[in-house]
Image (spheres, helix red, strand yellow):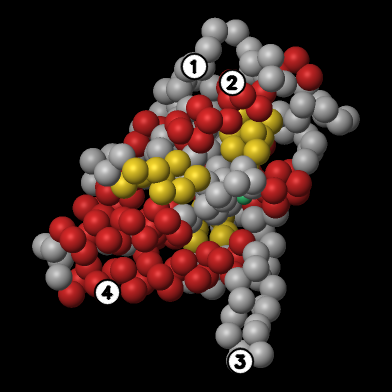
Amino acid sequence: MRPVRRNSSPISGDYSDYKKAKTDLISRIGSGWCHDIHLASYCNYCERPISTLLAVEHIEPKDGPHGRPHLIGRWDNFLVACPNCNSTKKDKLVNFKDLYFPDRDNTFHAFRYLADGNIEPMNAGDQIAEDTLRLTGLDKAMRQTQDVAGRLIAEERASQRMEIWKLAELGLKDFHSDPTNNVVKDSIVNNAVLSGFFSVWMTVFCDVPEMMNRFIDAFSGTRESECFDFQAAAISPAPNPDNLRAGGKI
Ligand SMILES: [Zn+2]
């Protein structure tokens, strides 16, 4: 879960139609760029690139038993999410002190990404991390779907993370084969931006701060979160520059 900062609202007051916030949200916290070319848009929870079905996600639900209808147009209550994360989270109760969110905590520091596509809490026994994974279904195990030739077909988030891990490993191999070649570095960043899953790329390149910094700059809102230092190491707790309620838990 990539930490982001959406910054202050681009309009004064609340949105009368929350869907109109979508473009600004994608631009600030849900985009991947290369040389000012927009290459992809991402879900703020699972980090997948989603080309057309991203929705404005209400962090505190807009309706249902825990609904907060007065927050329906509130900029601070928006993220962008894919259909899977959105429909799993649905209208569940959100207590900020009991969950991590990418706009207020250093969510990169909260989770460990594994080569098999699974995500686990960085610190064993971190109940908040476990509950956060459950909130959007990021704790779901991979379903093995294969074609007639026995090749894995990545139809869901965990297997897609595993695929992108392999792609990132190929990129790391290319980097080490020619570590001063800027064309290779640009190509790796392009691949990361096009394929999404920021945290997977950051994990595979964990010993290459130069490339980690390039990823941080290519995914919108990440540098602005102030959750990484100049060596690309995670700063924890998150500085929470907008003083969001119950932010900076990790
Ligand atoms: Zn998602």
Whether the residue carrying mark 3 lies under 8 Å from ligand 1 is answered with no
Q: Position of residue 12 (x, y in %)?
A: 54, 7
State the CA–CA distance, disc 4 to disc 1: 42 Å
In the picture, the disc for residue 10 is 1
Q: Of the residues under marks 4 and 3, which one precedes in the sequence?
A: 3
Disc 4 residue type (three-letter): Lys
Q: Does residue 40 sit above or below 169 in this rendering?
A: above
Judged from the image, the secondary structure of the residue bearing numbered disc 2 is helix
Residue that appears at 59% across and 21% down: 75
Residue 19: which quarter of the image?
Answer: top right
User: Which of disc 2 and disc 4 is earlier in sequence?
Assistant: 2
* Mark 2 to mark 3 CA distance (whole Å): 48 Å
**Which residue is the site of mark 4?**
173
The amino acid beneath tag 3 is Ala
Tag 1 secondary structure: loop
Tell me the kind of residue under disc 1: Pro
Q: Are marks 4 and 3 in contact (CB under 8 Å)?
A: no
* Cβ–Cβ under 8 Å for marks 1 and 2: yes
Q: Which residue is mark 2?
A: 75
